[in-house]
Amino acid sequence: HIPDETSWLFELVNWIGTTLVAAAVTVTFGLLFLVLRQPVAAVLTLLTFPLRLLNSVLKAIFDSPRPSEAVVRVTEIADGLGFPSGHAMGAMLLYGMLFILAPRLTASRPLQVAFRIAAMTTIILAGVSRIYVGAHWPSDVLGGYLWGLITLLGAGMAVRFCLRQTRIGRSQG
């Protein structure tokens, strides 16, 4: 059990993981990449938001319940199914993508490192916070991280393939 003095941190991280905040962060960074003349980075960032919809499909497939108050301390009543955690998966998608794209934001190595540390911290705290409030089992969070990472890597490979095909088409045309 984590002391109540730190509850505010987990409540903040849970709020950061809401759909509205995730949408705002996604659009903000997407626009920032456009301003920085990084259109591929903008598309990759914006792509993370619709990919979050995969979580609902996975929850329906696995049909896993959330923790109950009879078993753990629940401070946030969450509706729906448990596996995989949407907060953990969404954090891995968005902040994992921003971690990868950090060099596109700035040429400064120290700023890239700081940004990447912030992204990783957000990913980790997103999962820990869901366990802390009793909304998810640790396995739900690990599943969210794993499915988020698989989706992130799949999207990256698809974009890389499309870019390669575009270059091949231009060189032949």
Image (cartoon, grey):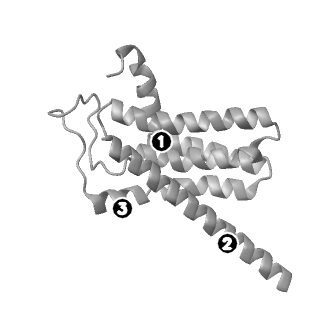
Residue 28 in percent (x, y) is at: 64, 42
Which residue type carries mark 3? Val
Residue at figure coordinates x 39%, y 51% from the top left: 143
Residue underneath mark 3: 57
Residue underneath mark 1: 20
Residue 3: quadrant of the picture: top left
Q: Is residue 69 visible?
A: yes
Residue mark closest to the camera, 2 vs 1: 2
| N-term mark: 3 or 1 | 1
Disc 3 versus disc 1: distance between alpha carbons? 20 Å
Q: Is residue 93 above or below residue 126?
A: below
Furthest residue to the left? 70
Q: Quadrant of the C terminus?
A: bottom right
Residue 8 in percent (x, y) is at: 42, 20
| N-term mark: 2 or 1 | 1
Disc 3 versus disc 2: distance between alpha carbons? 25 Å
Residue 161 is labelled as 2
Which residue type carries mark 2? Phe
Q: Is residue 18 above or below residue 12?
A: below
Residue 56 in percent (x, y) is at: 36, 57
Q: Element type at marker 3?
A: helix
Count residues near mark 2 (Cα–Cα under 10 Å), then give few for <14, some for 14-19, many for 20+.
few
| N-term mark: 3 or 2 | 3
Residue 73: quadrant of the picture: top left
Which residue type carries mark 1? Leu
Q: Element type at marker 2?
A: helix
Q: Nearer the viewer, residue 138 or 75?
A: 138
Q: Is residue 173 visible?
A: no
Residue mark closest to the camera, 3 vs 1: 3
